[in-house]
Protein backbone atom coordinates (compact mmCIF):
# COMPACT_ATOMS: atom_id res chain seq x y z
CA UNK A 1 0.00 0.00 0.00
CA UNK A 2 1.24 3.49 -0.81
CA UNK A 3 2.24 5.64 2.20
CA UNK A 4 -0.13 8.38 3.37
CA UNK A 5 0.12 11.56 1.31
CA UNK A 6 -0.73 15.16 2.05
CA UNK A 7 -1.71 17.08 -1.05
CA UNK A 8 -1.11 20.78 -0.62
CA UNK A 9 -3.03 23.22 -2.79
CA UNK A 10 -6.16 25.31 -3.10
CA UNK A 11 -8.99 22.95 -2.18
CA UNK A 12 -12.54 23.32 -3.47
CA UNK A 13 -15.44 21.02 -2.63
CA UNK A 14 -19.18 21.64 -2.91
CA UNK A 15 -21.69 20.65 -0.27
CA UNK A 16 -24.83 21.53 -2.23
CA UNK A 17 -26.07 23.16 -5.44
CA UNK A 18 -24.99 26.85 -5.53
CA UNK A 19 -28.05 29.07 -5.73
CA UNK A 20 -26.14 32.02 -7.23
CA UNK A 21 -22.64 33.15 -8.16
CA UNK A 22 -22.29 34.68 -4.67
CA UNK A 23 -23.49 31.58 -2.80
CA UNK A 24 -20.32 31.06 -0.75
CA UNK A 25 -22.18 28.73 1.63
CA UNK A 26 -22.51 26.09 -1.09
CA UNK A 27 -18.83 25.11 -1.03
CA UNK A 28 -15.75 24.82 1.14
CA UNK A 29 -12.60 26.49 -0.10
CA UNK A 30 -9.15 26.35 1.52
CA UNK A 31 -6.66 28.79 0.05
CA UNK A 32 -3.69 26.91 1.54
CA UNK A 33 -5.31 23.54 2.04
CA UNK A 34 -4.14 20.09 2.95
CA UNK A 35 -5.78 16.84 1.94
CA UNK A 36 -4.61 13.73 3.79
CA UNK A 37 -5.08 10.60 1.71
CA UNK A 38 -4.26 6.98 2.48
CA UNK A 39 -5.47 3.58 1.33
CA UNK A 40 -7.32 5.17 -1.56
CA UNK A 41 -9.47 7.30 0.73
CA UNK A 42 -9.54 10.89 1.88
CA UNK A 43 -8.80 10.92 5.62
CA UNK A 44 -8.81 14.64 6.36
CA UNK A 45 -9.43 17.98 4.67
CA UNK A 46 -8.49 21.37 6.10
CA UNK A 47 -5.88 24.12 6.34
CA UNK A 48 -2.48 22.70 5.39
CA UNK A 49 -0.83 23.53 8.73
CA UNK A 50 -3.58 21.76 10.69
CA UNK A 51 -3.49 18.69 8.47
CA UNK A 52 0.31 18.55 8.74
CA UNK A 53 0.19 18.61 12.56
CA UNK A 54 -2.21 15.66 12.71
CA UNK A 55 -0.69 13.63 9.87
CA UNK A 56 0.97 10.28 10.49
CA UNK A 57 4.75 10.32 10.55
CA UNK A 58 6.34 9.75 7.16
CA UNK A 59 3.44 11.15 5.18
CA UNK A 60 4.65 12.34 1.80
CA UNK A 61 3.84 15.98 0.97
CA UNK A 62 2.90 16.77 -2.63
CA UNK A 63 2.76 20.49 -3.31
CA UNK A 64 0.25 21.43 -6.00
CA UNK A 65 0.19 25.16 -5.23
CA UNK A 66 -1.00 27.41 -6.81
CA UNK A 67 -3.30 24.91 -8.54
CA UNK A 68 -6.81 24.01 -7.46
CA UNK A 69 -7.60 20.51 -6.16
CA UNK A 70 -11.17 19.32 -6.71
CA UNK A 71 -12.96 15.99 -6.61
CA UNK A 72 -12.39 14.12 -9.89
CA UNK A 73 -14.72 15.05 -12.72
CA UNK A 74 -17.64 12.74 -13.53
CA UNK A 75 -19.05 12.03 -17.00
CA UNK A 76 -22.51 10.48 -16.78
CA UNK A 77 -23.07 9.44 -20.40
CA UNK A 78 -20.71 8.41 -23.18
CA UNK A 79 -20.17 5.56 -25.58
CA UNK A 80 -17.03 3.46 -25.19
CA UNK A 81 -17.22 2.06 -28.78
CA UNK A 82 -17.52 5.51 -30.38
CA UNK A 83 -14.00 6.88 -29.95
CA UNK A 84 -13.53 6.59 -33.71
CA UNK A 85 -16.98 8.01 -34.47
CA UNK A 86 -16.24 11.47 -33.01
CA UNK A 87 -16.51 14.16 -35.68
CA UNK A 88 -18.54 12.15 -38.21
CA UNK A 89 -20.30 14.43 -40.70
CA UNK A 90 -24.09 13.92 -40.52
CA UNK A 91 -27.23 16.01 -40.77
CA UNK A 92 -28.91 14.64 -37.66
CA UNK A 93 -29.06 11.85 -35.08
CA UNK A 94 -30.64 9.11 -37.20
CA UNK A 95 -28.36 9.70 -40.19
CA UNK A 96 -25.36 9.75 -37.86
CA UNK A 97 -26.40 6.48 -36.18
CA UNK A 98 -27.09 4.63 -39.41
CA UNK A 99 -24.18 5.94 -41.46
CA UNK A 100 -21.35 5.75 -38.95
CA UNK A 101 -22.22 4.54 -35.48
CA UNK A 102 -23.98 1.27 -36.26
CA UNK A 103 -21.09 0.45 -38.58
CA UNK A 104 -18.26 1.31 -36.19
CA UNK A 105 -19.79 -0.53 -33.23
CA UNK A 106 -19.70 -3.80 -35.21
CA UNK A 107 -15.92 -3.86 -34.79
CA UNK A 108 -16.41 -4.56 -31.08
CA UNK A 109 -17.45 -8.12 -31.83
CA UNK A 110 -13.69 -8.68 -31.82
CA UNK A 111 -12.43 -8.83 -28.22
CA UNK A 112 -8.95 -7.73 -29.29
CA UNK A 113 -10.36 -4.53 -30.78
CA UNK A 114 -12.31 -3.81 -27.59
CA UNK A 115 -9.24 -4.42 -25.45
CA UNK A 116 -7.16 -2.04 -27.56
CA UNK A 117 -9.77 0.75 -27.51
CA UNK A 118 -10.26 0.30 -23.75
CA UNK A 119 -6.64 1.30 -23.16
CA UNK A 120 -7.11 4.49 -25.19
CA UNK A 121 -10.45 5.16 -23.51
CA UNK A 122 -9.14 5.06 -19.96
CA UNK A 123 -5.98 6.97 -20.89
CA UNK A 124 -8.25 9.69 -22.28
CA UNK A 125 -10.46 9.78 -19.18
CA UNK A 126 -7.36 10.28 -17.04
CA UNK A 127 -5.95 12.92 -19.40
CA UNK A 128 -9.21 14.87 -19.01
CA UNK A 129 -9.44 14.58 -15.22
CA UNK A 130 -12.51 12.32 -15.48
CA UNK A 131 -12.27 9.73 -12.72
CA UNK A 132 -15.76 8.22 -13.04
CA UNK A 133 -17.81 7.72 -16.19
CA UNK A 134 -20.99 5.94 -17.21
CA UNK A 135 -20.53 4.23 -20.56
CA UNK A 136 -22.57 2.34 -23.07
CA UNK A 137 -20.54 -0.53 -24.45
CA UNK A 138 -21.59 -2.19 -27.72
CA UNK A 139 -24.17 -4.96 -28.10
CA UNK A 140 -21.40 -7.54 -27.66
CA UNK A 141 -20.70 -8.89 -24.19
CA UNK A 142 -17.01 -8.86 -25.12
CA UNK A 143 -17.08 -5.05 -25.24
CA UNK A 144 -18.32 -4.87 -21.65
CA UNK A 145 -15.66 -7.39 -20.66
CA UNK A 146 -12.97 -5.21 -22.26
CA UNK A 147 -14.32 -2.08 -20.58
CA UNK A 148 -14.55 -3.53 -17.08
CA UNK A 149 -11.28 -5.43 -17.33
CA UNK A 150 -9.44 -2.19 -18.06
CA UNK A 151 -11.40 -0.26 -15.39
CA UNK A 152 -10.46 -2.94 -12.86
CA UNK A 153 -6.80 -2.81 -13.85
CA UNK A 154 -6.80 0.93 -13.19
CA UNK A 155 -8.96 0.69 -10.06
CA UNK A 156 -11.32 3.37 -11.37
CA UNK A 157 -14.93 3.69 -10.23
CA UNK A 158 -16.70 3.09 -13.53
CA UNK A 159 -20.24 2.31 -14.57
CA UNK A 160 -21.31 0.71 -17.82
CA UNK A 161 -23.20 -1.99 -19.57
CA UNK A 162 -23.63 -4.09 -22.65
CA UNK A 163 -26.14 -2.35 -24.91
CA UNK A 164 -29.48 -4.09 -25.50
CA UNK A 165 -30.71 -3.66 -29.09
CA UNK A 166 -32.68 -6.21 -31.11
CA UNK A 167 -34.24 -4.32 -34.04
CA UNK A 168 -33.92 -1.43 -36.50
CA UNK A 169 -30.16 -1.84 -36.75
CA UNK A 170 -27.87 -4.05 -38.86
CA UNK A 171 -28.46 -7.72 -38.11
CA UNK A 172 -24.87 -8.21 -36.93
CA UNK A 173 -25.34 -5.48 -34.34
CA UNK A 174 -28.45 -6.92 -32.74
CA UNK A 175 -29.10 -9.34 -29.93
CA UNK A 176 -32.42 -11.03 -29.09
CA UNK A 177 -34.60 -10.59 -26.02
CA UNK A 178 -33.20 -13.86 -24.64
CA UNK A 179 -29.53 -13.24 -25.44
CA UNK A 180 -29.82 -9.66 -24.13
CA UNK A 181 -31.15 -11.04 -20.86
CA UNK A 182 -28.54 -13.80 -20.63
CA UNK A 183 -25.59 -11.58 -21.60
CA UNK A 184 -26.62 -8.77 -19.24
CA UNK A 185 -26.90 -11.28 -16.38
CA UNK A 186 -23.49 -12.65 -17.30
CA UNK A 187 -21.95 -9.15 -17.31
CA UNK A 188 -23.50 -8.53 -13.88
CA UNK A 189 -22.17 -11.84 -12.54
CA UNK A 190 -18.71 -11.24 -13.98
CA UNK A 191 -18.21 -7.58 -13.08
CA UNK A 192 -20.76 -5.94 -10.79
CA UNK A 193 -19.28 -5.19 -7.39
CA UNK A 194 -15.84 -6.42 -8.49
CA UNK A 195 -13.05 -3.84 -8.09
CA UNK A 196 -14.99 -0.53 -8.27
CA UNK A 197 -17.31 -1.56 -11.11
CA UNK A 198 -21.03 -0.90 -11.38
CA UNK A 199 -22.96 -2.64 -14.14
CA UNK A 200 -25.73 -0.61 -15.76
CA UNK A 201 -28.77 -2.12 -17.52
CA UNK A 202 -28.46 -0.41 -20.92
CA UNK A 203 -31.32 -0.62 -23.44
CA UNK A 204 -30.05 1.67 -26.22
CA UNK A 205 -33.40 3.45 -26.83
CA UNK A 206 -36.99 2.74 -27.84
CA UNK A 207 -36.15 2.59 -31.56
CA UNK A 208 -33.83 -0.38 -31.24
CA UNK A 209 -35.68 -2.50 -28.68
CA UNK A 210 -38.76 -4.56 -29.53
CA UNK A 211 -41.66 -4.83 -27.12
CA UNK A 212 -40.32 -8.27 -26.18
CA UNK A 213 -36.91 -6.85 -25.40
CA UNK A 214 -38.45 -4.04 -23.34
CA UNK A 215 -40.26 -6.72 -21.31
CA UNK A 216 -36.95 -8.44 -20.67
CA UNK A 217 -35.32 -5.14 -19.71
CA UNK A 218 -38.09 -4.52 -17.19
CA UNK A 219 -37.56 -8.03 -15.83
CA UNK A 220 -33.84 -7.32 -15.36
CA UNK A 221 -34.67 -4.05 -13.61
CA UNK A 222 -37.00 -5.89 -11.20
CA UNK A 223 -34.51 -8.67 -10.64
CA UNK A 224 -31.65 -6.22 -9.96
CA UNK A 225 -33.33 -3.20 -8.33
CA UNK A 226 -30.04 -1.74 -7.11
CA UNK A 227 -28.57 -1.42 -10.58
CA UNK A 228 -28.54 1.75 -12.64
CA UNK A 229 -30.48 1.85 -15.90
CA UNK A 230 -29.47 4.03 -18.83
CA UNK A 231 -31.15 4.81 -22.12
CA UNK A 232 -31.79 7.70 -24.51
CA UNK A 233 -34.94 9.85 -24.47
CA UNK A 234 -36.31 12.66 -26.65
CA UNK A 235 -33.08 13.72 -28.27
CA UNK A 236 -34.35 14.52 -31.75
CA UNK A 237 -37.79 15.28 -33.19
CA UNK A 238 -37.65 12.56 -35.90
CA UNK A 239 -36.58 10.07 -33.23
CA UNK A 240 -39.57 11.01 -31.08
CA UNK A 241 -41.98 10.52 -33.99
CA UNK A 242 -40.49 7.12 -34.77
CA UNK A 243 -40.66 6.02 -31.13
CA UNK A 244 -44.36 6.84 -30.98
CA UNK A 245 -44.99 4.95 -34.23
CA UNK A 246 -43.32 1.89 -32.74
CA UNK A 247 -45.11 2.22 -29.39
CA UNK A 248 -48.54 3.68 -30.34
CA UNK A 249 -50.03 2.61 -27.02
CA UNK A 250 -47.74 4.99 -25.10
CA UNK A 251 -48.93 8.49 -24.14
CA UNK A 252 -45.56 9.97 -25.04
CA UNK A 253 -41.91 8.89 -25.31
CA UNK A 254 -41.35 8.91 -21.54
CA UNK A 255 -44.37 6.67 -21.11
CA UNK A 256 -42.70 3.97 -23.25
CA UNK A 257 -40.07 3.49 -20.57
CA UNK A 258 -42.57 3.93 -17.72
CA UNK A 259 -44.67 1.07 -19.11
CA UNK A 260 -41.77 -1.32 -18.64
CA UNK A 261 -40.88 -0.15 -15.10
CA UNK A 262 -37.66 1.46 -16.27
CA UNK A 263 -38.01 4.83 -14.52
CA UNK A 264 -36.58 5.30 -11.04
CA UNK A 265 -33.98 7.23 -9.06
CA UNK A 266 -31.17 5.24 -10.69
CA UNK A 267 -32.38 5.79 -14.26
CA UNK A 268 -30.23 7.98 -16.49
CA UNK A 269 -32.05 9.40 -19.51
CA UNK A 270 -29.63 10.69 -22.11
CA UNK A 271 -30.62 14.04 -23.66
CA UNK A 272 -34.29 14.38 -22.58
CA UNK A 273 -34.50 17.67 -24.46
CA UNK A 274 -38.02 17.85 -25.86
CA UNK A 275 -40.23 16.86 -22.91
CA UNK A 276 -43.83 17.91 -22.32
CA UNK A 277 -44.91 19.19 -18.91
CA UNK A 278 -46.44 15.78 -18.27
CA UNK A 279 -43.15 14.05 -19.03
CA UNK A 280 -41.25 16.47 -16.81
CA UNK A 281 -43.67 15.64 -13.99
CA UNK A 282 -43.04 11.93 -14.53
CA UNK A 283 -39.28 12.45 -14.28
CA UNK A 284 -39.81 14.39 -11.07
CA UNK A 285 -42.11 11.77 -9.59
CA UNK A 286 -39.90 8.82 -10.45
CA UNK A 287 -36.59 10.58 -9.68
CA UNK A 288 -35.21 9.68 -13.11
CA UNK A 289 -32.36 11.92 -14.24
CA UNK A 290 -32.20 14.00 -17.43
CA UNK A 291 -28.62 13.79 -18.68
CA UNK A 292 -27.60 16.93 -20.54
CA UNK A 293 -25.03 16.39 -23.31
CA UNK A 294 -24.34 19.87 -24.68
CA UNK A 295 -21.57 19.28 -27.25
CA UNK A 296 -23.57 16.41 -28.74
CA UNK A 297 -26.81 18.40 -28.86
CA UNK A 298 -25.06 21.19 -30.76
CA UNK A 299 -23.08 18.89 -33.04
CA UNK A 300 -26.11 16.82 -34.08
CA UNK A 301 -28.41 19.85 -34.06
CA UNK A 302 -30.69 18.08 -31.57
CA UNK A 303 -31.95 21.09 -29.61
CA UNK A 304 -31.35 23.46 -26.70
CA UNK A 305 -31.75 21.69 -23.34
CA UNK A 306 -34.10 23.64 -21.02
CA UNK A 307 -31.72 23.43 -18.03
CA UNK A 308 -33.20 26.25 -15.98
CA UNK A 309 -36.80 25.29 -16.73
CA UNK A 310 -36.12 21.80 -15.41
CA UNK A 311 -34.25 23.06 -12.39
CA UNK A 312 -36.63 25.80 -11.26
CA UNK A 313 -40.05 24.29 -12.00
CA UNK A 314 -42.32 23.47 -9.08
CA UNK A 315 -41.59 19.79 -9.61
CA UNK A 316 -37.92 19.97 -10.61
CA UNK A 317 -36.22 17.47 -12.88
CA UNK A 318 -32.92 16.01 -11.66
CA UNK A 319 -30.12 16.93 -14.09
CA UNK A 320 -26.70 15.45 -14.80
CA UNK A 321 -24.13 16.55 -17.39
CA UNK A 322 -22.10 14.46 -19.82
CA UNK A 323 -19.98 14.40 -22.98
CA UNK A 324 -21.91 11.79 -25.02
CA UNK A 325 -18.79 10.81 -26.96
CA UNK A 326 -19.00 10.09 -29.97
CA UNK A 327 -22.08 12.27 -30.66
CA UNK A 328 -20.31 14.70 -28.36
CA UNK A 329 -17.23 16.44 -29.68
CA UNK A 330 -15.00 16.71 -26.62
CA UNK A 331 -13.92 14.34 -23.86
CA UNK A 332 -13.38 17.35 -21.59
CA UNK A 333 -15.99 18.05 -18.93
CA UNK A 334 -14.63 21.63 -18.86
CA UNK A 335 -15.47 22.06 -22.55
CA UNK A 336 -18.79 20.33 -21.93
CA UNK A 337 -19.78 22.97 -19.39
CA UNK A 338 -18.49 25.72 -21.68
CA UNK A 339 -21.00 24.53 -24.29
CA UNK A 340 -23.71 24.05 -21.65
CA UNK A 341 -23.22 27.70 -20.73
CA UNK A 342 -23.57 28.79 -24.37
CA UNK A 343 -26.76 26.77 -24.83
CA UNK A 344 -28.29 28.59 -21.87
CA UNK A 345 -27.10 31.90 -23.35
CA UNK A 346 -29.09 31.09 -26.50
CA UNK A 347 -32.11 30.38 -24.29
CA UNK A 348 -31.70 33.71 -22.48
CA UNK A 349 -30.66 31.94 -19.27
CA UNK A 350 -27.42 31.90 -17.28
CA UNK A 351 -25.49 29.01 -15.86
CA UNK A 352 -23.02 30.36 -13.33
CA UNK A 353 -19.53 28.86 -12.97
CA UNK A 354 -20.09 27.68 -9.41
CA UNK A 355 -23.06 25.68 -10.61
CA UNK A 356 -21.05 24.27 -13.50
CA UNK A 357 -18.28 23.00 -11.24
CA UNK A 358 -20.88 21.66 -8.82
CA UNK A 359 -22.50 19.84 -11.76
CA UNK A 360 -19.24 18.16 -12.87
CA UNK A 361 -18.50 16.93 -9.34
CA UNK A 362 -21.08 16.62 -6.56
CA UNK A 363 -24.05 17.24 -8.90
CA UNK A 364 -23.17 14.27 -11.07
CA UNK A 365 -22.29 12.16 -8.02
CA UNK A 366 -25.75 12.87 -6.59
CA UNK A 367 -27.34 12.07 -9.94
CA UNK A 368 -25.62 8.66 -9.74
CA UNK A 369 -26.59 8.17 -6.06
CA UNK A 370 -22.86 7.87 -5.35
CA UNK A 371 -22.23 11.06 -3.39
CA UNK A 372 -21.19 9.05 -0.33
CA UNK A 373 -18.16 7.79 -2.31
CA UNK A 374 -17.25 10.41 -4.94
CA UNK A 375 -17.89 14.03 -5.88
CA UNK A 376 -16.56 15.79 -2.76
CA UNK A 377 -13.37 16.05 -0.71
CA UNK A 378 -15.23 14.92 2.40
CA UNK A 379 -13.31 12.56 4.71
CA UNK A 380 -13.99 8.88 3.95
CA UNK A 381 -14.62 9.65 0.26
CA UNK A 382 -12.60 7.84 -2.37
CA UNK A 383 -9.45 9.83 -3.21
CA UNK A 384 -10.36 10.47 -6.86
CA UNK A 385 -9.17 13.98 -7.59
CA UNK A 386 -8.34 16.49 -10.27
CA UNK A 387 -5.70 19.22 -10.09
CA UNK A 388 -6.60 22.24 -12.23
CA UNK A 389 -4.14 24.78 -13.62
CA UNK A 390 -5.83 27.98 -14.78
CA UNK A 391 -2.49 29.15 -16.28
CA UNK A 392 -2.10 26.08 -18.46
CA UNK A 393 -1.62 27.96 -21.73
CA UNK A 394 -0.07 31.37 -22.47
CA UNK A 395 -3.48 32.82 -23.32
CA UNK A 396 -5.00 31.44 -20.11
CA UNK A 397 -2.09 32.75 -18.05
CA UNK A 398 -2.51 36.20 -19.57
CA UNK A 399 -6.21 36.21 -18.77
CA UNK A 400 -5.48 34.91 -15.24
CA UNK A 401 -3.50 38.10 -14.60
CA UNK A 402 -6.83 39.93 -14.82
CA UNK A 403 -8.74 37.47 -12.61
CA UNK A 404 -9.42 38.31 -8.99
CA UNK A 405 -12.10 35.93 -7.69
CA UNK A 406 -12.54 32.18 -7.43
CA UNK A 407 -15.69 32.31 -9.59
CA UNK A 408 -13.76 34.19 -12.30
CA UNK A 409 -10.99 31.60 -12.21
CA UNK A 410 -13.50 28.75 -12.53
CA UNK A 411 -15.18 30.50 -15.42
CA UNK A 412 -11.82 30.93 -17.15
CA UNK A 413 -11.05 27.21 -16.65
CA UNK A 414 -14.42 26.30 -18.12
CA UNK A 415 -14.22 28.74 -21.03
CA UNK A 416 -10.60 28.28 -22.12
CA UNK A 417 -9.61 25.05 -20.40
CA UNK A 418 -9.30 21.51 -21.73
CA UNK A 419 -6.98 18.59 -21.01
CA UNK A 420 -4.03 21.01 -20.85
CA UNK A 421 -5.58 22.52 -17.71
CA UNK A 422 -5.58 19.12 -15.99
CA UNK A 423 -2.27 19.24 -14.14
CA UNK A 424 -2.81 15.87 -12.45
CA UNK A 425 -5.47 13.23 -11.96
CA UNK A 426 -5.58 11.02 -8.87
CA UNK A 427 -7.35 7.68 -8.88
CA UNK A 428 -7.84 6.04 -5.48
CA UNK A 429 -5.07 8.21 -4.07
CA UNK A 430 -2.52 7.64 -6.84
CA UNK A 431 -1.35 10.24 -9.36
CA UNK A 432 -2.03 8.73 -12.78
CA UNK A 433 -1.95 11.47 -15.41
CA UNK A 434 1.75 12.26 -14.98
CA UNK A 435 2.49 8.58 -15.57
CA UNK A 436 0.75 8.36 -18.95
N1 LIG B 1 -29.60 7.36 -29.41
C1 LIG B 1 -29.46 6.03 -29.54
N2 LIG B 1 -28.17 5.68 -29.63
C2 LIG B 1 -27.47 6.81 -29.56
C3 LIG B 1 -26.08 7.10 -29.58
O1 LIG B 1 -25.23 6.23 -29.72
N3 LIG B 1 -25.74 8.40 -29.47
C4 LIG B 1 -26.67 9.40 -29.32
N4 LIG B 1 -26.25 10.65 -29.19
N5 LIG B 1 -27.96 9.15 -29.30
C5 LIG B 1 -28.37 7.87 -29.41
FE1 LIG C 1 -25.57 8.78 -26.16
Image: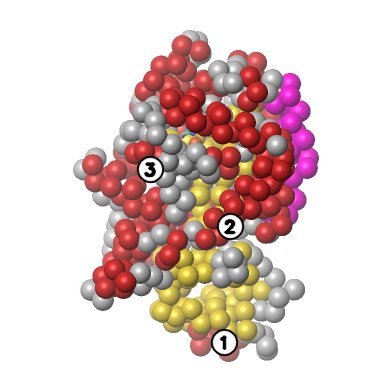
Q: Earlier in the sequence, mark 1 or mark 2?
A: 1
Q: Which residue lies at the image location 78% right of the left edge and 42% below the top edge?
A: 190
Which span is picked out in magenta?
A: 177-196
Pointer 2 local density, CA inside 10 Å: few below 14, some 14–19, many at least 20: some
Residue 180 image position (x, y, % from top left): 70, 26
Q: Is residue 8 above or below residue 138?
A: below
Report the quarter where the C terminus lies: bottom right
Q: Can residue 415 be found in the magenta stretch?
A: no
Q: Are marks 1 and 2 in contact (CB under 8 Å)?
A: no
Does any atom of ligand 2 lie closer than 8 Å to the CB of label 2?
no
Q: Which residue is mark 1?
A: 52
Residue 16 image position (x, y, % from top left): 43, 57
Q: Which residue is mark 3?
A: 294
Q: Nearer the viewer, mark 1 or mark 3?
A: 3
Dividing the picture into quadrants, the one containing residue 348 is top left
Q: Is residue 141 above or below residue 215?
A: below
Q: Which residue is mark 2?
A: 123
Report the quarter where the N terminus lies: bottom right
Q: Are marks 1 and 3 in contact (CB under 8 Å)?
A: no
Q: Is residue 68 above or below residue 47?
A: above
Secondary structure category for the residue under label 3: helix
Amino acid sequence: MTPPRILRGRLLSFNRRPLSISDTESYVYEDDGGLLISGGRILAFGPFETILLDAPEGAEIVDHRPNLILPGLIDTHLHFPQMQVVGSYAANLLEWLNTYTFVEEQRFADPAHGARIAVSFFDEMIRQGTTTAVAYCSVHKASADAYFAEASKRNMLMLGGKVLMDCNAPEVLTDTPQSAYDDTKAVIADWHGKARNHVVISPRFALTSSHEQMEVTGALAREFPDLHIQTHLSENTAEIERALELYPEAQDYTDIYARYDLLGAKTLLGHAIHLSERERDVLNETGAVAVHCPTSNLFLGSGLFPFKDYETREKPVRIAVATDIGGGTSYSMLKTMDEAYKIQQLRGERLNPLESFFAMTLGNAEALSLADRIGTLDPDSDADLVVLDARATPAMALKMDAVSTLAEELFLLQTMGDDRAIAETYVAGNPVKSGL
